[in-house]
Image (spheres, rainbow, N blue to C red):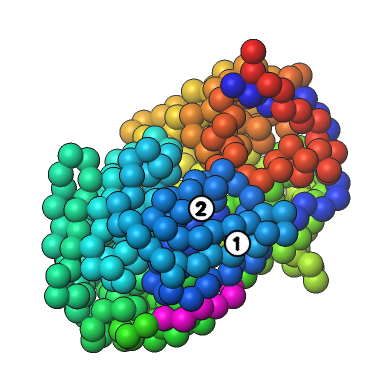
Amino acid sequence: MDSIIVTGGKELSGEIPIAGAKNACLALMPATLLSEEPLTLTNAPRLSDIKTMTELLASLGAEASALADGQVLAMSSHNIDNHVADYEIVRKMRASNLVLGPMLARLGQAVVSLPGGCAIGARPMDLHIQGLTALGAEIELKDGYLHAKAPKGLKGAVYEMGFASVGATENIVMAATLAKGTTVLKNAAREPEIVDLVSCLKKMGAHIDGEGTSTITIEGVDRLHGATHPVVTDRIELGTYMLAPVIAGGEVECIGGRLDLVEAFVEKLDAAGVSVEETARGLKVSRKNGRLSAVDVTTAPFPGFPTDLQAQMMAMLCTADGTSVLEEKIFENRFMHAPELMRMGANIDVQGGKAIVTGVEQLKGAPVMATDLRASVSLILAGLAAKGDTQVNRVYHLDRGYEHLVRKLSGVGAQVERVPGS
């Protein structure tokens, strides 16, 4: 299994291009199932999760091919001949469940395995099931598969989610585009990935209002047509690379970065002593002066502080002046990176859903183990400022969410190397 070795102490300078959003692309790809006409996505990230979704769509009978070195995805679902999303593919990635709503809407039936993905909490399918049931679906869990059918077709309804789930919002919105009548989805997720999905669906002929707010209204149509759509900038990759010069020192411009995607995150950076400057091409980031200050962070659905940047923020706060409290409100079991950071000399006390981080003067390189996607990159960020070498093992998680990470960090002066496992 590959490892990444980081040699700390190198200041960073230059620019890093930010890819299209993984989580947006993984929702946009199943939208092809809603139409017989082609859907083309540009600015697609080149990641293993995208390959997994491509494999899943192909197993259902869709055609999907990567063009322009993988940054363009050309898809067509004119001949869907299978409605079963098999466990062997779905287990690799939680976003696989996003084929459920589109298949149910277009085919009237779907059998989808319960999903896999990072081990950061249960993340149950309840809200997906309840929302689709409100639209008239009949769903039964049997032998690890969701067996869904809508023998009379889906019908518009008013449904309020108990929690603003991104995945459930995406599944329900896609299903409702072809339902009869009007669907009103209350307590909907507001993330930029939702707005991006709705933008694409509108280009395909969907009638939707309210995206980006907690109430989304969908007027069902008889059919959707093809479209071409650019994937929105990945705000999590953006936030991750914004932290690199903050932790290592120096100044980096994140090309394609947008302030509106990371406002809550930038507020905390500002409080900690970080300068974020909008430029014509993106966002330029550096420390304001001297040692960073401790800040408290509580994760929340958008527009709050993203749970997917919590691990990276913890890495930054390990050497800040003072004590920070990070509270995880989205997923349980999402502090698995804390013990690994402690191996590098960090002072962290995990108490249930809170991590109390008291900054130290210097982290020290050590062999550490990646436990999930965001934990992996947090350890690499910590290694940028650590004394000596940090070896991050089990980095296959990284390939799911960061394209060309070693190349991008090396390009701004970091000493980072990926080595094959023995």
CA separation in Å, label 2 and label 1: 9 Å
Residue 349: quarter of image? top left
- Viewer-side residue, 231 vs 310: 231
For the question of whether residue 347 can be seen, the reply is: no
Q: Position of residue 305 (x, y in %)?
A: 49, 55
Q: Callout 2: helix, strand or loop?
A: helix
Q: Position of residue 153 (x, y in %)?
A: 19, 75
User: Does residue 278 lie above or below 210 as drawn?
Assistant: above
Q: Which mark is residue 58?
A: none
- Viewer-side residue, 81 vs 1: 81
User: Does residue 247 lie above or below 220 as drawn?
Assistant: above
Q: Position of residue 46 (x, y in %)?
A: 64, 50
| Residue behind mark 2 | 54
> Dividing the image into 4 quarters, which one contains the C terminus?
top right
Q: Position of residue 405 (x, y in %)?
A: 70, 41
- Viewer-side residue, 261 vs 156: 156
Over which residues does the magenta segment extend?
Answer: 224-229
Q: Callout 1, which amino acid?
A: Leu
Mark 2: few/some/many CA within 10 Å (<14, 14-19, 20+): many
Residue 154: quarter of image? bottom left
Give the residue at x 67% y 36%: 381
| Residue behind mark 1 | 73
Mark 1: few/some/many CA within 10 Å (<14, 14-19, 20+): many
- Viewer-side residue, 75 vs 184: 75
> Dividing the image into 4 quarters, which one contains the N terminus?
top right
Q: Callout 2, which amino acid?
A: Thr
Of pointers 2 and 1, the one earlier in the residue sequence: 2
Give the residue at x 18% y 63%: 149
Task: Judge whether residue 203 is colored magenta.
Answer: no
In the displayed structure, does residue 67 sit left or right of residue 23? right
